[in-house]
Amino acid sequence: MRTHPATTRSIPCLLAAIAAVVLLALPAVAAEPAPGLANAANAIPPAELYRGQTIVTGQGETNRILGFASCLEDVLIKVSGMLRLAGDPRLDPYKADAAKLVRDFSYRDEKGGKPKNDEQGTRDRSFILTAEFDEAAINGMLAKLGVKPWLARRPVLGVFVEMQPGARRYVVAGDSKETDLQRAALLAAAAKRGMPIVLPDAAALAGVGANELPLAGIAPAKIAEAVAGRGGEVVLIARLVWDDQELRWNSDWQLDWQGRSQQWQLAAVTFDEAFRQGIGAAAQILAGHQ
C-alpha cells in the first residue's frame, strides 16, 4: 500500500540522505529557531548571524571538523544573504580550515532524555553542534569573495505557504496543529538564513479567504494585511505541489517588495529543503544580490 507524502517523508528523506552522502554534506538542523527569528518584534542579534548549527554523529574530532565546514558555509550565506555561495568551490579551502575561524562551540544531545541504544551511547549518537565564528574573519573572507556582509536591519517576512501533497490543499498557519511540521521547518529555515519571519494564524487565513481560495486568487494587499498586525513588512508567498513521478516538491515563489513582484521556481525532495531554498532566495533579493 502506498503511503501519502502528506503523512510521511520517508522516500524524499531517503533521497536527500543519499544526496547528502554523495556531496559529503551534513544534513541541516531542524533545530529550535534562534532568539529573535520567530518574533518579528525583535531584531536579529548581530552575533546570531555568525553562529551556525549542524548535526554531527558523536563528539569526535573528525566529525567536528566536518561540522565546522558545514557551519561555515551556512554562516557565510547568512551573513551575506547570498544563497549562491551554497556549494561554491571557492569556499573549499576555507572550509578545510574552518576550525581556525571558530571562537567557541558546543554540543547538544539531539536525543537528550531518550535511552541509549547499543552504540548510540557513544560514537553513533547524534548531537547538534553549534559553532560561533570570528566576525572579522568572516567579513574578511567575504571581502575576498567579492561579497559584502548584509549588516543592515532585515525586513520581516510575512510568509504564506500553500501546500498540495495530493488532492488536498492547505496553508501553513502559525497556530495550527495540522501544520506543526511545516511551521517548525519554516522557522528552522528562517533561522538558518538569518531572516525574521511571521506566519499568519488560522483566523487571519480564514479572514482573507485562504481556506476557500488559492493564494493566487487573493489580492496581494489583502494577503499583506493578514500579517501586517504581527509585524510583517514584506510578503513572501509559496505554493508547493508534490510530484509523484519525480518524487519531489515543485514550488513557485513570489516576493512582493517596494512595489515590485519577483517570482521564481524551485524543486526539492523535502519541504524542509524547499523552505531553506525559498527563504534563502528571498534574502538574496532583499540583500541586493540580484
Image (tube, grey):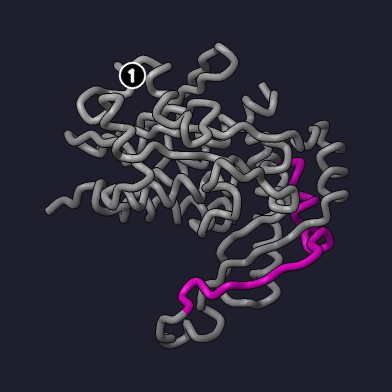
Q: Is residue 85 left or right of residue 270?
A: right
Amino acid of disc 1: Ala
Q: Residue at x 38, y 53 (%)?
A: 13
Relative vertical location of residue 195 with respect to residue 126 in this rendering, above or below: above
Q: Is residue 80 left or right of residue 245?
A: right
Question: Residue 27, percent across and down?
Answer: 52, 56
Q: Is residue 146 magenta?
A: no
Q: Which residue is mark 1?
A: 216
Quadrant where the C terminus is found in the figure? top right
**Residue 286, located in which quarter of the rendered image?**
top right
- Residue sitting at the far left: 1
Relative vertical location of residue 195 with respect to residue 290 in this rendering, above or below: below
Q: Is residue 104 magenta?
A: yes
Label 1 CA crowd tier, 10 Å (few <14, some 14–19, many 20+): some
Question: Residue 41, percent across and down?
Answer: 58, 42
Q: Which residues are magenta?
A: 89-112
